[in-house]
Image (cartoon, rainbow, N blue to C red):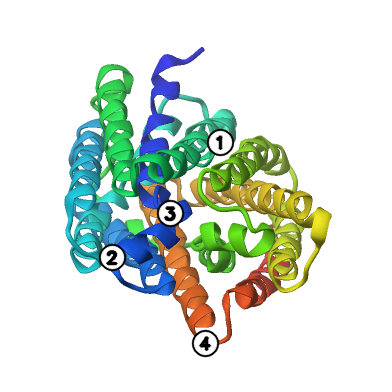
Amino acid sequence: MNTRLLSLVFAPFALGTSAFIYIGLIEPMSRDLGVGIASVGQLQTVFALACGIGGPILARLLSKFDRKRLLLCVLTILVFMNVGSAIAPDLIIIGSIRFTAGFFAALTLPLASTLAVSLVPEADRPKAIATVLAGYTLAFLIGMPAGSILGDVYGWRSAFWLAAAIAGVALVVIGLFAPAHIHVPQPGASSFRRALQGENPKFMLITMLGFAGTFATVSYIGPVITASTGITGSGIAAIQISTGLGSLLGLPAGAMLAKLSARTALTTLLAVVLLTQLLFSVGMLFDLAAFSIPVLVFTMAFNSAALFGTSPVIQTQLAQAAGPAATIAFALNGSMIYSGQGIGSSMGGAVTSSIGLGWTGFSGAIAVVLALVVARRLSV
């Protein structure tokens, strides 16, 4: 058991929990803050777009610094972001805090991925990346449901205190066990060209479109669960666990599919994402009676599994093509993840405000179709 590698799992665990801790509590937050559901959903847009902007910029400006120390700084910022969100008086201040912190939080995954691949030979990179990304599955499996339960019992602000505590634990664990003194070459224009060579721009576009499609619904998962099943309060947390279970299965599945051609692997995974996005809307627009909960659990689990399965496939291809510019490639792809989340959240909010929450799945499906078109054009 590689303790140094396992310690890095806590980085995406802290990031994922911090990013999504409130999404099962959108309705109580909207009531307490006196704003609409779509407005609360835009907190994810603010955080994700800030991450999308900050990632590539900071990856270049801070490349000469030790990777571990940078990661510890980012985790400290996540702690303060969650504490600030817990005590903020209104939505505007919460959004401002999350935007400011999101600019730096973008470095979490690139830094953790760079540290992970430094610990293993090239042949084991897919497994190392999948291991680190498993921290996201913990966020969906443990962090978000726990936040929903805590928020239902003690109020939504308590969920942000939980996220701050998880980020604090990650700070300690990584400080103690993660590898130190890992540096990468100072990137110049040639590093960015290396990171974007070959099929890498297509992979990054697929990442953005896939996450945009999914987050058109996932950003509003609390209201989606209620609209599909009538379940409210702590019951939302029980349904949320299916997302964590799906992501837990998706990462090893993606690592195995990475052995196939990227075109085949991504086409298969994106087809599943497309199907599940359509099922989200079917569950909300039609009364499925006794089948509503099983269909939603299936939809959430397989949607998460397929989306997370794309990450090892894409990250492996990026690392192979970028070589020493892998950190820049990871940062750029991370920017696409966050941009996709922001675009999806905005798209879902616009659809919810204009024609209703039930149509968010169909809007997300459009973005996934575009991702499939790009995947079919890959030559690897």
First reached walking from the N terminus: tag 2 or tag 3: 3
Judge left or right: residue 324 versus residue 93: right
First reached walking from the N terminus: tag 4 or tag 2: 2
Judge left or right: residue 272 versus residue 319: right
First reached walking from the N terminus: tag 4 or tag 3: 3
In the picture of the structure, the residue carrying the numbered disc 3 is 25
Up-down: is 8 above or below 229? above
Name the amino acid, label 2: Leu
Under circle 1, the secondary element is helix
Residue 86 percent across, percent down from the top left = 23, 48
In the picture of the structure, the residue carrying the numbered disc 2 is 33
In the picture of the structure, the residue carrying the numbered disc 1 is 130
Can residue 327 be seen here? yes
In the picture of the structure, the residue carrying the numbered disc 4 is 354
Judge by depth and name the residue closer to the eye, 213 or 41.
41
Name the amino acid, label 1: Ala
Mark 1 nearby-residue class (10 Å; few <14, some 14–19, many ≥20):
many
Query: What's the CA distance linking mark 4 and mark 2?
Result: 22 Å
Residue at (36%, 35%) from the top-left corner?
11
Residue at (64%, 42%) from the top-left corner?
242
Mark 3 nearby-residue class (10 Å; few <14, some 14–19, many ≥20):
many
Up-down: is 352 above or below 259? below
